C-alpha cells in the first residue's frame, strides 16, 4: 500500500466513524425506550391532572348545590305561613317537599363519597357565600312582607331560585359519573321544571 492509498483509507474511516457517532444515539433502542417512557409518564401526569380537576369541580359544585338547598328550604319554611294565596301556598308546599327530598339524596351522596355528614363540614368559603345569598333573599322577602307584597315577590324569587337549582343540577349531571346521582338529578329536575311554571306564571289577580 503506497502513501496515497493509506491516506485515502484513513480519510474514509474518519467519515464513517463520524457518521456513526452522529447517528449512534438515535439508533440506540435504549434511547427510544427511554423516550417513549418519558412521553408516557407525561401523558399519565396530564391525564391525572385532568381527572383530578374534574373530581374537584364535581365536589365543589355538589357542595354549592347542597348549601343552596338547605338555605332555600329554610327560607321557604319561614315565609310559607305568611302567603295569602292558597294556590301559591300549595306550590310552596310542593317546592318544600321537592327540595327536602333532593337535599336528603344529596346529603346521602356526599356522606358516602366525601364522608361529609353536615354542611358545617364543607368548605367554609362555600358556606359563607351561600349564607350571604340567603341573607339577601331573606331581606327582600322580609321587606315584601312588611309592604304587603309578599305573594308577588315570593313567587318571583322562588322562580329565580328554581331556575338556579335547575342550572346547578344540569351542570352536576354533566360532570358526575355516578349513575345514581344522575338519576336523582334528572328526576328532581323535572319536578322543579313543573314548579317553575307555577311560580313564574303566578298572578295575584287570580
Image (cartoon, grey):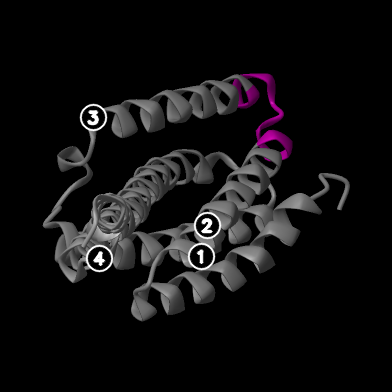
| Residue corresponding to mark 2 | 171
Name the residue that disc number 3 marks.
Answer: 124
Figure quadrant of the N terminus: bottom left
| SS class, disc 2 | helix
Q: Which residue is mark 1?
A: 174
- Residue 152 in the magenta stretch? The answer is yes
Q: Residues within 10 Å of mark 4 (few under 14, many from 20)?
A: few
Q: Residue at x 65, y 33 (%)?
A: 150
* Label pair 2/3, CB-CB below 8 angstroms: no
Give the label, 3 or 4, closer to the camera: 4
Badge 2 crowding class, 10 Å Cα cut-off, few under 14, some 14 to 19, many 20 or more, is some
Where are the magenta residues, as a range? 144-153
Q: Which mark is residue 32?
A: 4
Asked if residue 71 lies in the magenta stretch, the reply is no
The tag earlier along the polypeptide, 3 or 1, is 3
Q: Which SS type dominates the magenta stretch?
A: helix
Q: Is residue 183 above or below residue 200?
A: below
**Residue extending farthest front:** 2
Q: Residues within 10 Å of mark 1 (few under 14, many from 20)?
A: few
Query: Relative to residue 88, is residue 72 drawn left or right?
Result: left
Is disc 3 surrounded by few (<14), some (14 to 19) or many (20+) residues within 10 Å?
Answer: few
Question: Does label 2 or label 3 sit earlier along the sequence?
Answer: 3
Are discs 1 and 2 less than 8 Å apart at CB?
Answer: yes
Q: For the residues carrying marks 4 and 2, which lies nearer the camera in this image? A: 4
Residue drawn 20% across the image and 71% down it: 29
- Looking at this view, is 36 or 130 the one in front? 36
The image position of residue 157, as x and y in percent, is 64, 38
Tell us which disc is closer to us: 4 or 1. 4
Give the x, y percent position of residue 169: 51, 60
Q: CA distance from mark 4 to mark 2?
A: 43 Å
Relative vertical location of residue 182 with respect to residue 142 in this rendering, above or below: below
Amino acid at each position: 500500500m503506497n502513501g496515497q492509498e493509506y491516506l485515502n483509507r484513513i480519510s474514509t474511516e474518519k467519515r464513517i466513524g463520524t457518521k456513526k457517532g452522529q447517528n449512534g444515539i438515535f439508533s440506540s433502542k435504549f434511547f427510544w425506550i427511554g423516550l417513549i417512557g418519558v412521553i408516557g409518564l407525561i401523558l399519565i401526569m396530564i391525564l391525572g391532572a385532568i381527572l383530578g380537576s374534574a373530581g374537584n369541580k364535581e365536589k365543589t359544585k355538589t357542595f354549592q348545590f347542597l348549601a343552596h338547598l338547605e338555605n332555600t328550604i329554610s327560607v321557604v319554611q319561614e315565609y310559607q305561613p305568611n302567603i295569602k294565596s292558597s294556590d301559591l301556598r300549595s306550590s310552596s308546599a310542593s317546592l318544600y317537599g321537592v327540595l327536602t327530598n333532593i337535599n336528603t339524596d344529596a346529603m346521602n351522596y356526599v356522606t358516602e363519597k366525601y364522608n361529609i355528614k353536615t354542611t358545617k363540614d364543607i368548605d367554609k368559603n362555600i358556606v359563607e357565600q351561600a349564607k350571604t345569598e340567603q341573607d339577601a333573599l331573606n331581606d327582600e322577602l322580609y321587606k315584601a312582607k312588611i309592604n304587603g307584597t309578599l305573594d308577588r315577590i315570593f313567587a318571583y324569587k322562588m322562580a329565580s331560585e328554581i331556575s338556579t337549582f335547575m342550572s346547578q343540577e344540569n351542570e352536576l349531571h354533566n360532570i358526575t359519573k355516578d349513575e345514581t346521582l344522575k338519576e336523582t338529578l334528572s328526576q328532581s329536575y323535572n319536578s322543579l321544571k313543573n314548579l317553575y311554571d307555577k311560580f313564574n306564571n303566578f298572578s295575584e289577580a287570580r
